[in-house]
């Protein structure tokens, strides 16, 4: 594992108290006001592209409930995902036991997904399911036999006569809105990305603006923001780590995840307290039918099962993952040992057709150790217990929740002298979330939260100094609101504001954070999306990276100004294109350091629902730091980052795929005794500085899958996946040697071939 300096640039002097101030004049505000006026002035009544409704493929009829009498019609609101599956079902009208039978049936339905401009989109539909009491057959005496429940029919598309008779009526209610500024990949597509090992969260690595600190490590720079500035959320609950160390699976089982969003910057007002971007995952709603999923690979195994109870009103879920990496690590990285595990459990009960109460408990454990140095580099565990009440009515949502947390962390650099940073915290947080549709053109979202944490055993390793903090109780409270305003079919505005108050390390902080996003349909197929926001972060919220000390920015209170401009449009061959310009400025208020990152992102996507699908993400960027009026490249600046993903459906359940990842080298600076940094006296002074860039790095991942789907809906898949199939080595640093001059440090190839089996029902 490579060692990097704890500071963002090791040449920053620590004793200079000069502070770089950013002077913002009225041009920024006036420019945004002028832009808003231009949007309104150019808006017209030209209709927006319409959504083509989903088409029924497999809609097996509901089984008439045993013991029931008479006919019934149940109205359901369904969420049809981009892959045509039913992601969620909510009863709008119906009575027991018919509604339970209808819900169980629709969970097995399959659709050709809805489309807008030829691109699959997520929609809500109303479906009316008719259940008719079967006519009992006559026996040999001519009497009617006792009615028996109908056998489960074979899945098939409904005939035209059945549709006209009203057995199934479908009406599109709305298109599920994608957050402005987010990058979202459908769940099924994300699980097919080679090298991601079927984990929806790992797809963030192939998105534009994202670069891992080293190939294979699940810690990312996002638009120049260091890993410690990225916020991780599960159902709005913040967690200290989102990925396990090593192979990097997420700390939540894939079967629970409904969607994953990456907000590279200017994230929505409901998130806060991070100076970089946000990675947010949402779990699927409790299921009204039994389901399960399991995976076993050469380095870990996991499983999930969820079973309904109380005739479908309740559901209980249990899931977990455990790694057995000892033998594998001895082959690919014998100097290290690691282990990880996680668990999830959820019990939910629907008290009415609109209300549900639930308890969701989850946690994870990670440990990484350098056996040669006899030093633990990472030892992290966290626990979360979330008690929540949800109400959903006519598209409006409320959530009231309390979260109990316990975290323990140790992080150290790969050094014999680094004792390491430690932290133990126990806390409680209460939050309220509202999502209300005021009218067809106005949607209000608001919320508030408050909590306290007891911190003990906190110490930070800062270079050769070890800073300790006394035990204390920190407090945090915040509130937010934003409004989605549809001025016309072509113009949408999202103004927002967030307020956060903190008392941390015996100091008080108050942050005011405005946000603004907009979307303008320049033409029926070309959208212009803009976003601007101000965010803050305290050093106590930093995510620690194994074997890497915190940077100067991560050790300070930060204020970040973020802006982006995007053009989105469908392209030929059912592709979607997006081009983004972004600019981020970060002020490390207490570290005398500022930073800025700016660049261009290109993202092309073709759904894996097509026979040939994939993504192409390209980022051209520059990341700089400033100290004492001196500007220099950040030690993690990468000019070019490219991810290309392709998958092809061979038919009969066979699928192949490949991913290519390219990144240009990071800059380096080395103190040398001679101008050319050649060999010399090891005791001579080093007044010269050698500068350059590390060599670029290219990695190829592959994936092969054979999948069987059974009539019952169960499935089984055999996979072969190889991360870094060409055994590419990455250069991590450059040092001066008295024998050879400049000498590159290259780590052994981090490669991970895996044979796995996956299945579900």
Image (cartoon, rainbow, N blue to C red):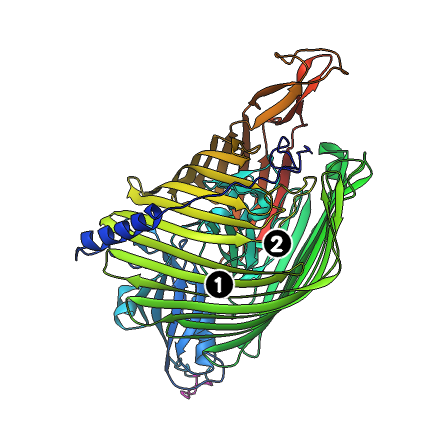
The residue sitting at 30% across, 44% down in the picture is 570
Image quadrant for the C terminus? bottom right
SS type, badge 2: helix
For the residues labelled 2 and 1, the Cα–Cα distance comes to: 17 Å
Label pair 2/1, CB-CB below 8 angstroms: no
The part of the image, by quadrant, that contains residue 212 is top right
Q: Outermost residue toward the left?
A: 45
Give whichever of 597, 140 is nearer the camera: 597
Other residues around mark 2 within 10 Å, as few (<14) / some (14–19) / many (≥20): some
**Residue 673 image position (x, y, % from top left):** 68, 15
Q: Is residue 183 visible?
A: yes
Q: Which mark sits nearer the N-terminus, 2 or 1?
A: 1
Foreground tag (2 vs 1)? 1
**Residue assigned mark 2:** 541
**Is 33 located above or below residue 693 in the figure?**
below
Residue at horizontal 24%, vertical 53%?
A: 37
User: At 44% from the left edge and 68% from the top edge, which residue is drawn?
Assistant: 446
Q: Which residues are magenta?
A: 139-146
Locate residue 196, reporting x and y percent: 56, 43
Q: Quarter-wise, where is residue 649 in the image?
A: top left
Residue 563 drawn in magenta: no
Q: Is residue 386 visible in this depiction of the protein?
A: no
Q: Is residue 257 above or below residue 64?
A: above
Residue in the foreground of this view, choosing between 761 and 550: 550
Where is residue 229? Give x, y as percent: 56, 48
Instruction: Determine which residue is flagged by label 1.
Output: 499
Q: SS for tag 1?
A: strand
Whether residue 144 is in magenta: the answer is: yes
Q: Main secondary structure of the magenta part?
A: loop
Left or right: 248, with 433 as reference point: right
């Amino acid at each position: 594992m490579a060692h990097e300096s704890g500071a963002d640039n090791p040449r920053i002097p620590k004793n200079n108290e000069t502070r770089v101030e950013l002077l913002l004049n009225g041009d920024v505000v006036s420019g945004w006001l002028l832009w808003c006026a231009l949007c309104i002035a150019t808006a017209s009544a030209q209709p927006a592209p319409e959504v083509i409704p989903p088409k029924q493929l497999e809609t097996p009829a509901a089984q008439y409930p045993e013991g029931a009498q008479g006919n019934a019609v149940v109205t359901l609101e369904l969420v049809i995902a981009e892959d045509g599956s039913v992601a969620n079902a909510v009863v709008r009208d119906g009575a027991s036991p018919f509604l339970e039978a209808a819900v169980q049936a629709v969970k097995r339905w399959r659709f050709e997904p809805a489309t807008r401009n030829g691109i699959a989109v997520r929609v809500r539909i109303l479906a009316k399911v008719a259940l008719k009491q079967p006519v009992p057959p006559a026996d040999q005496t001519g009497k009617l036999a006792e009615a028996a429940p109908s056998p489960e029919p074979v899945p098939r598309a409904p005939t035209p006569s059945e549709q006209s008779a009203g057995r199934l009526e479908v009406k599109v209610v709305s298109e599920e809105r994608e957050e402005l500024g987010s990058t979202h990949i459908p769940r099924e597509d994300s699980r097919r990305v080679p090298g991601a090992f079927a984990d929806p969260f790992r797809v963030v690595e192939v998105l534009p603006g994202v670069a891992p600190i080293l190939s294979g490590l699940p810690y990312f720079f996002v638009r120049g923001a260091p890993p410690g500035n990225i916020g991780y959320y599960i159902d709005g609950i913040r967690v200290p780590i989102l990925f396990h160390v090593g192979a990097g699976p997420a700390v939540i089982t894939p079967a629970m995840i409904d969607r994953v969003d990456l907000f590279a910057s200017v994230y929505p007002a409901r998130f806060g307290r991070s100076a970089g971007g946000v990675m947010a995952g949402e779990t699927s709603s409790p299921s009204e039918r039994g389901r399960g999923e399991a995976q076993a690979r050469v380095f870990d195994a996991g499983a999930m099962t969820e079973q309904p109870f109380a005739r479908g009103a309740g559901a209980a879920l249990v899931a977990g993952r455990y790694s057995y990496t000892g033998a594998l690590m001895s082959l690919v990285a014998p100097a290290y040992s690691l282990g990880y595990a996680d668990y999830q459990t959820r019990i939910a009960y629907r008290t009415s057709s609109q209300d549900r109460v639930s308890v969701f408990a989850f946690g994870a454990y990670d440990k990484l150790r350098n056996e040669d140095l006899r030093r633990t580099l990472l030892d992290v565990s966290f626990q979360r217990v979330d008690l929540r009440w949800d109400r959903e009515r006519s598209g409006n949502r409320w959530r009231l929740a309390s979260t109990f947390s316990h975290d323990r962390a140790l992080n150290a650099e790969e050094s014999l002298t680094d004792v390491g940073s430690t932290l133990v915290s126990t806390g409680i947080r209460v939050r309220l979330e509202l999502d209300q549709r005021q009218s067809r053109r106005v949607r209000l979202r608001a919320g508030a939260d408050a909590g306290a944490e007891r911190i003990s055993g906190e110490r930070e390793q800062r270079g050769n100094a070890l800073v300790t903090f006394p035990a204390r109780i920190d407090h945090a409270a915040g509130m937010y609101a934003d409004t989605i305003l549809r001025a016309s079919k072509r113009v949408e505005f999202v103004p927002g504001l967030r307020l956060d108050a903190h008392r941390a390390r015996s100091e008080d902080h108050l942050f005011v954070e405005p946000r603004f996003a907009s979307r303008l349909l320049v033409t029926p197929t070309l959208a212009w999306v803009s976003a601007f926001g101000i965010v803050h972060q305290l050093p106590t919220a930093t995510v620690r990276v194994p074997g890497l000390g915190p940077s100067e920015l991560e050790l300070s209170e930060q204020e970040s100004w973020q802006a982006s401009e995007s053009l989105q449009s469908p392209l030929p061959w059912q592709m979607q294109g997006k081009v983004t310009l972004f600019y981020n400025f970060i002020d490390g208020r207490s570290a005398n350091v500022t930073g800025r990152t700016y660049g261009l992102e290109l993202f092309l996507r073709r759904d894996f629902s097509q026979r040939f699908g994939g993504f192409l993400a390209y980022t051209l960027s520059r990341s700089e730091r400033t100290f004492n009026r001196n500007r220099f490249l950040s030690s993690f600046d990468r000019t070019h980052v490219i991810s290309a993903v392709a998958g092809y459906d061979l038919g009969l359940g066979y699928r192949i795929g490949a991913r290519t990842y390219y990144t240009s080298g990071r800059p380096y600076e080395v103190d040398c005794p001679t101008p050319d940094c050649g060999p010399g006296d090891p005791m001579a002074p080093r007044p010269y500085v050698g500068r350059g860039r590390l060599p670029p790095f290219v990695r190829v991942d592959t994936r092969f899958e054979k999948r069987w789907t059974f009539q019952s809906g169960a499935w089984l898949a055999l996979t072969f996946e190889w991360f870094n199939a060409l055994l590419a080595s990455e250069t991590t640093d450059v040092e001066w040697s008295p024998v050879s001059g400049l000498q590159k440090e290259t780590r052994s190839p981090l490669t991970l071939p895996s044979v796995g089996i996956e299945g579900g029902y």
